[in-house]
């Protein structure tokens, strides 16, 4: 075996020896197609083909051909969403022609009341900002991915940087949040922060949850 062959096999997930706890996505219901759909449904940023191939332990060619096939199938079926290759990766997007329906839904959502989960998450962010999603989840004890998206859609929170150590996105409240709360600054928030866990404790809990 030549050095070139060794390099190729080392970079191709499908050529590596299977691990004991590895799962063959082809054997799952729907196979690789369904596995790719499931993964892409939970990503927030476009994800590239090598990352998908490595995560699912299949070849890059399989991922490329399957993604192209899915995108073409959605277009042919006229689905309300599309699978697009953008910014170096793949992600689901609402189809442009359905923008009026999406806009109406989002505007209606602005008038709807926040759920208890949204209020609790917003409170943690308001008092602990800048704070990462993992820390917020550590306080609430549940995943807050969907709630974070809702709060950002409502314009109540926004990304304000990245953690220097982990690179995680940090969130904080917006001027619109202050407006809705009837505050001129965060200093006017009620004294609730002392009842929340310390930052070090949040980091420890978040680390255990990974």
Image (cartoon, helix red, strand yellow):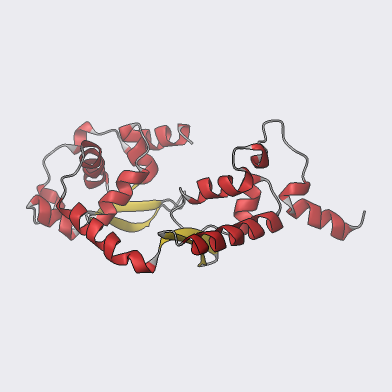
**One can see residue 170 in this view:** yes
Q: Answer with the quarter of the image where residue 8 lies.
A: bottom right
Taking the image as shown, residue 78 lies to the left or right of residue 33, namely left
Residue at horizontal 25%, vertical 34%? 196
Q: Residue at x 77, y 51 (%)?
A: 10
Residue plotted at (23% across, 55% down): 154
Please identify the residue farthest to the right as the structure is shown: 1
Comparing 96 with 114, the one in front is 96
Residue 130 seen from this side: no
Outermost residue toward the front? 77
> Measured from the top left, where is residue 163 in percent x and y?
41, 52
Q: In front: 56, or 160? A: 56
- State left or right for residue 108 relative to residue 19: left
| Residue 137 image offset from top left, x and y in percent | 35, 38
Estimate the x, y position of residue 203 in percent, counting from the top left. Answer: 40, 37
Nearest to the observer: residue 40 or residue 104? 104
In this picture, residue 203 sits left or right of residue 104: right
Residue 199's image quarter?
top left
- Residue placed at 50% from the left, 51% from the top? 40
Observer-nearest of 163 and 90: 90
| Residue 52, x across and y down, in percent | 60, 52
> Is residue 136 placed above or below 88 in the rendered structure?
above
Q: How many marks?
A: 0
């Amino acid at each position: 075996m030549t050095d070139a062959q060794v390099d190729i096999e080392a970079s191709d997930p499908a050529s590596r020896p299977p691990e004991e706890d590895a799962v063959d996505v082809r054997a799952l219901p729907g196979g690789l197609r369904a596995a790719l759909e499931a993964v892409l449904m939970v990503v927030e940023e476009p994800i590239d083909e090598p990352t998908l191939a490595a995560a699912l332990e299949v070849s890059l060619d399989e991922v490329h051909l399957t993604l192209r096939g899915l995108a073409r199938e959605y277009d042919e079926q006229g689905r309300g969403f599309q699978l697009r290759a953008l910014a170096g990766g793949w992600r689901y997007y609402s189809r442009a022609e359905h923008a009026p329906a999406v806009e109406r839904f989002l505007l209606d959502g602005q008038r709807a009341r926040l759920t208890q989960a949204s209020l609790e998450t917003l409170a943690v962010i308001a008092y602990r900002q800048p704070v990462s999603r993992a820390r917020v989840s550590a306080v609430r004890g549940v995943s807050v991915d969907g709630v974070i998206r809702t709060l950002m859609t409502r314009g109540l929170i926004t990304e304000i940087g990245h953690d220097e150590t982990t690179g995680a996105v940090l969130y904080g409240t917006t001027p619109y949040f202050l407006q809705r709360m009837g505050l001129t600054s965060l200093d006017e928030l009620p004294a609730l922060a002392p009842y929340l866990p310390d930052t070090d404790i949040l980091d420890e809990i978040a680390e255990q949850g990974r």
